Each structure stands twice: as C-alpha cells, then as structure tokens.
Amino acid sequence: MWKEIVSFFEGSPAKLKVSRRMVELGFGVNAEGKIVCGGIEIPDSSMSRGVDVDRRVVRETVEDIVRDARMRRIFSGIKPAGSFLSDIAPTLGYSVVEIRAKPDSIGVIAEATARIAEAKVSIRQILAEDPDLNPDPKLLIITEKRIPGEVVSRLLEIPTVTKVSIS
C-alpha cells in the first residue's frame, strides 16, 4: 500500500508528508472529502499545523485522493487502531518489551510471543511498525509484568532479532 501512495504523490513531497501522517495516525477520508479519525472530522488547518505544511496542501492532498478511485478506496478504508499503552505502561504496572529485527524478517511476532507465553507472562498489547513506513521498525509488546531475564536471552536467540530492551 505505502509504495502505491509514494508513487501516487511522486514529485510532491508536501502531499506525501500529509498522506504519510494520515496513514501513521489512522486518518481516513470520508465520502464528503473530509479527513476523519473514527468518524470525527479533522480540520485541514489542524492537520496542516500537525504536519507543518500549508492548509492548502492538506486540501489538495485530500482532493487528489478523492479524485483517484484506488487512493479513495485505500483512504476511505483506513481506520485508527486505538490507543497504544507504551507511554503509560509503567503507570498501569505493565512493562514494554522493544524488539528490533531485520526489516524483512518473518515470524518474529510468533516467536517472541511464544517465548513470552512460555514464561507465563500475559501480553496486553502488540504494535509492529511497518518496515515500509519506518526504516528501523520495532516490535513493541506490552506485558502485564516485567519478563524474566532468561526470556530476554531467549528473545535474543531468534535469528533475525538484533536488539531487545525492556522498560
């Protein structure tokens, strides 16, 4: 999907910047040509301040999306994923496991979650960053409690994992 969006906005870095932020935040476009997040309209001026572009660039980006059938289908289907707890995990008594792996890795989520489950630690949330959007993607796993040190060692044994940190 991201490669299509990059190709569509080729030659217009400001519009690409707007569309990237929309994808990152789960902002879609509704039938009226408005930016929406979970059905709530996001004003062009708010989006422009958040992305640091002129509001006319935001409006032109949305108009380009609405005019193109493929982009309209993509952006009308984008939905927010909900709140992510990583920043407030310690407040809630949870822990965050951050795993870095080679971007083209397969099976890291399956391997990591299996090793955490074997330690009888419950997983509350998972976020895997898209390697097309982030050149150094990470896997963030929110657990109900801190994982034992031996689990960290087992996570590092996953062949494509390059780094594991716990907070």
Image (cartoon, rainbow, N blue to C red):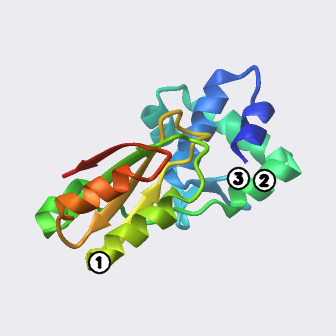
**Mark 2 vs 3, N-terminal side:** 3
Residue 129 versus residue 116: which sits nearer the camera?
116
The type of residue carrying mark 3 is: Gly
Q: Compared with residue 11, is residue 156 higher up or lower down, i.e. above or below?
A: below
Which picture quadrant has residue 115?
bottom left
Residue 135 versus residue 50: which sits nearer the camera?
135
Which picture quadrant has residue 5?
top right
- Mark 1 is surrounded, within 10 Å at the Cα level, by few (under 14), some (14 to 19) or many (20 or more) other residues, namely some
The type of residue carrying mark 1 is: Ser
- Left-right relation of 62 to 39: right
- The residue sitting at the right extreme is 69
Residue 86 image point, x, y percent: 28, 57
Residue designated by label 1? 122
Please give the label number shown on residue 72.
Answer: 2
Residue 131 image point, x, y percent: 57, 42
**Mark 1 vs 2, N-terminal side:** 2
- Mark 2 is surrounded, within 10 Å at the Cα level, by few (under 14), some (14 to 19) or many (20 or more) other residues, namely many
Q: Compared with residue 136, is residue 69 higher up or lower down, i.e. above or below?
A: below
Q: CA distance from mark 1 to mark 2?
A: 39 Å
**Residue at image point 69% right, 37% down:** 61
Please give the label number shown on residue 37.
Answer: none
Please give the label number shown on residue 33.
Answer: 3
Residue 166 visible in the displayed image: yes
Q: Secondary structure at mark 1?
A: loop
Residue 88 image point, x, y percent: 20, 59
Residue 32 visible in the displayed image: no
Mark 1, mark 3: which one is toward the viewer? 1
Residue 110 versus residue 44: which sits nearer the camera?
110
Residue 42 image point, x, y percent: 51, 52
**Mark 1 vs 3, N-terminal side:** 3
